[in-house]
Image (spheres, grey):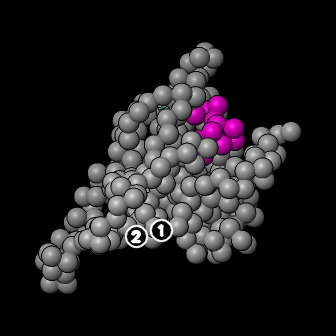
Amino acid sequence: MDDLGWLKQQKACHTDIKIPPHIAVIMDGNSRWAERFHHSRTWGHHQGAQALKRTVRACYLLKIPYLTLYAFSMENWQRPKEEVDDLMELLVMYLRSERSELKEHGIRLHVIGNLDLLPLEVQQEVMITQEFLNNSQGMTLTLAISYSAREEITRAVQTIAKQVSIGHLEPEDITAEVIGNSLSTAGIPDPDLLIRTSGEMRLSNFLLWQMAYTEFYFSDSHWPEFNAKLLWQAITDFHNRKRRFGQRVDHQPNKGHIVTQLLQKPLVTNQEKSFLRA
Ligand code: FPP
């Protein structure tokens, strides 16, 4: 049985498992994986791209509504030019080769990050792919490219400050919701589960605002080895977590209504349910 067949079987056997509606992934360890086999970094990134394809397939098979992948950080621009060029080329190849399959499975593409810094060819492929997948109703795949959470938050603050300076917003009207709506992830629920591979345990400037209550799962496997079984392990681990959002589940004072709402919020919203039923 192949990996996806195995995953299908797991899902069918564990109908009560809590599948996180939004999974975010820091795909780490391509170069270390390549080193282990005395291959080049380029080879490692190519293997990483295969793992990325496998993960997208596994997530749409599980009908996960949101998948967010950290594909290229703002800090990654500091890597040697050949490596940056390789990663940009891989991105173009990925978008060109996968968009038909993404459409077939109703996947929408959202891209976050400072896209102005990307080579024109990459910007064009991103635009073409987004337009091509425009009417999709299924999973939202978000790629973070040339992304920095601190930059994203800084931009949001600038946008809000401009609104205040022209009198469209009062300082006391700036709420967490206003800030969330000014980020590039506006309209996308916060990640429920973050997976980071290759044994590193840090956030590396990824979705700092959005991950306030995200559950973290660290895997020792390097990203190129990531597969349906490792994904299922992470989901099983998530299933066993008790999410309290800072409160005691047996004591919910009236004043804590915002947190209480979070606690009572079903794991899957109605919109997500209709997608799951489709
Ligand atoms: C970490 O490897 C990963 C990245 C730099 C970004 C993720 C890139 C891919 C999965 C390649 C394919 C991407 C697309 C969008 C098709 P690393 O070199 O930092 O590994 P290390 O931690 O072992 O040095």
Q: Residue at x 33, y 69 (%)?
A: 258
Where's residue 118, x and y in %?
44, 52
> SS of the residue at dot 2?
helix
Residue of label 2 = 261
Per the image, the residue denoted by label 1 is 265
Q: Residue at x 17, y 71 (%)?
A: 161
Magenta part of the protein: which range? 223-235
- Relative depth, front residue between 245 and 252: 252
Give x and y (percent) for residue 270. 58, 75
Report the amino acid beneath label 2.
Gln
Q: CA distance from mark 1 to mark 2?
A: 6 Å
Looking at the rendered structure, the kind of residue marked 1 is: Lys
Residue at the right extreme, as displayed: 1
Q: Are marks 1 and 2 in contact (CB under 8 Å)?
A: yes
Q: Do we see residue 198 in this rendering?
A: yes
* Quarter of the image with the C terminus in it: bottom right
Residue 40 lies left or right of residue 164; in this view the side is right
Looking at the image, can residue 25 be seen? no
Pick the front one: 213 or 70:
213
Quick one: which residue is furthest to the bottom in this view? 168
